[in-house]
Amino acid sequence: MFKHLTRVCLRLPSALETTNLTFYRFAGHSKWQNIRHIKGAKDAERSLLFTKLSRQMKVAIQEGGSIDIKKNLKLENVIEQAKRANMPTATIQSVLRSCEQDKSNSKSHLIEIKGPGGCIILCEVFTSNLHALKQNISTILKKHKGKYSDGGGMHLFEEKGVIVAEMSELEEATDHAIEVGAEDVKDTGGYLEFTCGASSLNKVVSGLEKFNYRIKSASVEFIPLKVQELSDEDLKICASLYEKLEGLSEVVRLSDNIA
């Protein structure tokens, strides 16, 4: 089905192009992506990274209704990501046990935010008191040219599996992407980024590992179908907004459509 996939621009086959599975997020190296890469280096600090993964496990358990990875695909994906980040097995088990004992009635919610320059930010949270959390977030937004969206932002995104691997020859990676069932692969400047269907994440990862790819990360993410360009000033404000939001213990993950 990928016979029209070219090695230069990695277009999807004509039979699938009508499904609008076109991804703009990874085109080029925008200022925002550079800012996020710098922030990402800080996020690699062990304690903060593990905290984020622990939050994602809790959400996966709440949504999937089970701590059994055989019955909860989302939890399996997060645990695999935690293992790649060298999160100790004892820590993972501790998170799972705490979720079994948790009686706080926390739930996951998705908050749509209209940020600086008209960008859309999806804020995934896990909390037992959404009203109080939204009040805290509202205070942060007022200081960063942001507000709650009236809705409709979700249609600008699509959930996809995103796999980052150490760089290898792009032409060969294109052939491997076809074989393992990935929808796209791009050189993002030192790394390869494979995109696949959300439910195919583990299958694609396993396939790539058989080809000896060293996987840096693999997760299901909200990918924007179209992006919003911002001024330098708004990019700086967004960077500060991200820092404040990620500092809230209830915030699980942030996604955006910034170019």
Image (spheres, grey):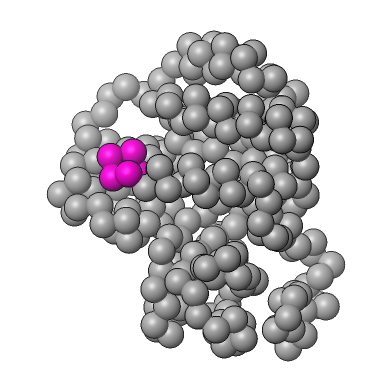
Which residue is at the far front?
232
Q: Nearer the viewer, residue 110 or 63?
A: 110
* Left or right of residue 124, residue 153 in this image: right
Whether residue 46 appears in magenta in the rendering, the answer is yes
Identify the image quadrant of residue 129.
Answer: top left
How far from the left and from the top, in percent, is residue 135? 54, 11
Q: How many numbered marks does the figure carry?
A: 0
Q: Is residue 250 above or below residue 80?
A: above
Identify the image quadrant of residue 80.
Answer: bottom left
Q: Is residue 170 above or below residue 96?
A: below
Res 110 visible: no
Q: Residue at x 45, y 60 (%)?
A: 218
Res 31 visible: yes
Q: Which residues are magenta?
A: 45-49
Q: Residue at x 70, y 42 (%)?
A: 258
Identify the image quadrant of residue 64.
Answer: top left
Q: Nearer the viewer, residue 230 or 160?
A: 230
* Left or right of residue 200, residue 48 in this image: left
* Left or right of residue 61, residue 130 in this image: right
Whether residue 85 appears in magenta in the rendering, the answer is no
How far from the left and from the top, in percent, is residue 175? 60, 87
Q: Nearer the viewer, residue 70 or 175?
A: 175
Q: Main secondary structure of the magenta part?
A: helix
How far from the left and from the top, in percent, is residue 13? 77, 79
Q: Residue at x 33, y 38 (%)?
A: 48
Instruction: Quarter of the image for the N terminus: give it.
Output: bottom right
